[in-house]
Image (cartoon, coloured by chain):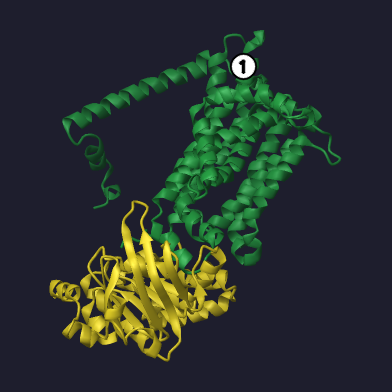
Chain colours: A green, B yellow
Amino acid sequence: MNHRLLPLASRLRRELFATPLDGLISVGLVVGLGAGLQALLHWALTQADWAVVQANSTLLVVGRYPLEQQWRLWLLTALLCGAAGITWGLLRGRGWPRSDRLAAAVLLVLGVVLPASLGLTAPIQQRWWWITGLLLLGRWAAGCWGAALPLRWRRLLPLAWPVLYLLGLGLIGGGLGLMTVRPSQWGGLLLTLIEASFAILVCFPLGIALALGRRSALPLLRWCSTLYIEFIRGAPLITLLFLGQNILGFLLPGGLAPDRVWRAAWILTCFAAAYVAEAVRAGLAALPRGQWEAARSLGLNMAQTLLHVVLPQALRVALPATVGQFITLLQDTTLLSLIGLLDLLGVARAVMANPEFLGRNAEVYLVLAVLFWCCCAALGLGSRALEHRLNRHSLRSEP
Amino acid sequence: MTEAMPSLDTAADPRAVMIEARGVEKWYPNGFHALRGVNLTVHQGEVVVIMGPSGSGKSTFLRTFNALEDFQKGSIVVDGIELSDDVRRIDAIRREVGMVFQQFNLFPHLSVLDNLTLAPTLVRHRNKAEVQKQALELLGRVGIHEQAHKFPGQLSGGQQQRVAIARSLCMEPRILLFDEPTSALDPEMVQEVLMVMQELAKEGMTMVVVTHEVRFARQVADRVVLMADGDVVEIAPPEQFFSAPQHPRSRQFLSQIS
């Protein structure tokens, strides 16, 4: 019998008060949660002074990005939100299931309430309304007419994202007629997202290559991959970051050593790649030998076997662990503040050091925690949707 | 042992030679001597059934034909191509030699139809629509036309094995190898797979089958090969092999399985 169909009272009794001990635990938890929430609300509404966040919201989000060039970031945000809406719509189609209605409602509230509560000026508030509207419009339009588009067009969608990513880097950094904004001027959430997204995108293929290398039949390749993975996994990230900042400059001839920001991004990438490699290796190991043999005996060569038979299955197994690694990576970007980069935490520390807002650490840290939580939750939701999609059709074959 | 089986091997048979194994020896990395100078010739259109106790090396021997197992001594010529370490040569042989496994080894992430069309489109660069048409015909032949868009995990063992046979056939191989094709099946599904194999034999497919199915060997095989301890001990037509086995190991084996 489906528990959801029971009346509320008997459902409660069944789920919360089935035995005296269950009841005791439930009551204890409810009381504890209530007390905690009340204390937090009391603090947030009466004691906290949110001026520190309101006054520094721009700084926290983009750092010292030049004011007159910030239209580029607005444009990029609008493009990303539009593309996200269209992707969402194409994946879901015409219908609006409950989860979609909920997500749309949350977005609307965020788009209207958040800018207002931050005390942003009216024109900027309106920009957020437009952007939220664009996202939902994209969702609606693509949902309605996406299916009517020729299949060839819809196939382009996965390609649109990397293109958009490169375009975004171009917009942020400038060049080609746009004024150059050097990486040292990037900061805040912007820098955190650039570092994390770059590392995530590049460490994934790198990790796959390392995992394949570690299982290769060529001894030298196998040893090198193993050595690399074990060395990286044995060293704390912060050490590697300091090492990268100090040594890379000496090792590479002057012009070749990347800028401090990109240096850190590459260190993050190489670090995460070793962990992704281990997740992918587990996926490869889970694949029965018979899959290789069947593919090879059909005449597929090594590359075709990997691309069409081995990796699709191995990556599906490795996906949850890999996304866990991505989430860790996103949080690890806070270490950049320790090597002097103004990422989200770095900017926040600068704000807290401002005598004007002395003693307002709790407010800033809370906002930081919520921002990180939002980014990680988005990653987690995305991966679960992807996992669901990959597993939609196939039940695993068990002979 | 070669001298114990005169007329049945090679020379007299006018049909083309499809597989020629001479003095094949294999040691596993742990030193186990798995194949001890095995000889076997398979002619075009012939059905050869290899039997023998477990550990006798029959599967290992079969898997040397398409280079899934390597060997250290001797030679194997398949369809005129001699096996060597040359990857391109191995790929060329594998294109012409289909294999059906005990555990089916279908690709679980692909639909039944895609399981069939993957290799012909990738390896033979054939037109996808044309291959799909052929694949549906093949699925019809093995009696699972209506399951084309399901995934392997949704089929029974017998159905999966028939899909695996159709997948091999879709590459239009000149030889089919069967490695204990019915050993992983529930008893009631064995027959449906054997029927398909029997049909193939009737159509003149060259087949080498490792199996324990005596009835199949009796009805379909042209010759039965008995392997023991890494070597062939007897090759005989089925009626002779099952009614009057020559070698003591054959008699021992037959008494154990009946």
Question: Relative to residue A36, is residue A44 drawn left or right?
Answer: right
Between residues A306 and A143, which one lies in front from this camera angle?
A306
Taking the spot 53% from the left edge, 77% from the top edge, the residue there is B131
The crowd level at tag 1 (other Cα within 10 Å; few <14, some 14-19, many 20+) is some
Residue A123 x %, y % = 73, 33
How many numbered tags mark residues here?
A: 1
Position of B251 relative to B90 (above/below): below
Question: Relative to residue B164, is residue A107 drawn left or right?
Answer: right
Taking the spot 22% from the left edge, 68% from the top edge, the residue there is B53
Name the residue at the right extreme: A177
Between residues B144 and A80, which one lies in front from this camera angle?
B144
Circle 1 SS class: helix
Position of A119 relative to A320 (above/below): above
Question: Relative to residue A357, is residue B221 drawn left or right?
Answer: left
Taking the spot 27% from the left edge, 86% from the top edge, the residue there is B237
Quadrant, the C terminus of chain A: bottom left
Q: Quadrant of residue B124?
A: bottom right
Taking the spot 76% from the left edge, 29% from the top edge, the residue there is A253
Q: Please give the residue where the numbered disc 1 appears in the rendered image.
A: A349
Q: Amino acid at mark 1?
A: Arg
Q: Quadrant of residue A241?
A: top right
Question: Relative to residue A180, is residue A388 drawn left or right?
Answer: left
Residue B240 x %, y % = 21, 86
Residue A298 x %, y % = 48, 69
Residue B198 x %, y % = 32, 84
The reply to whether residue B115 is visible in this rendering is yes
Position of A148 relative to A6 (above/below): below
Between residues B196 and A160, which one lies in front from this camera angle?
B196
The reply to whether residue A149 is visible in this rendering is no
Q: Chain of mark 1?
A: A
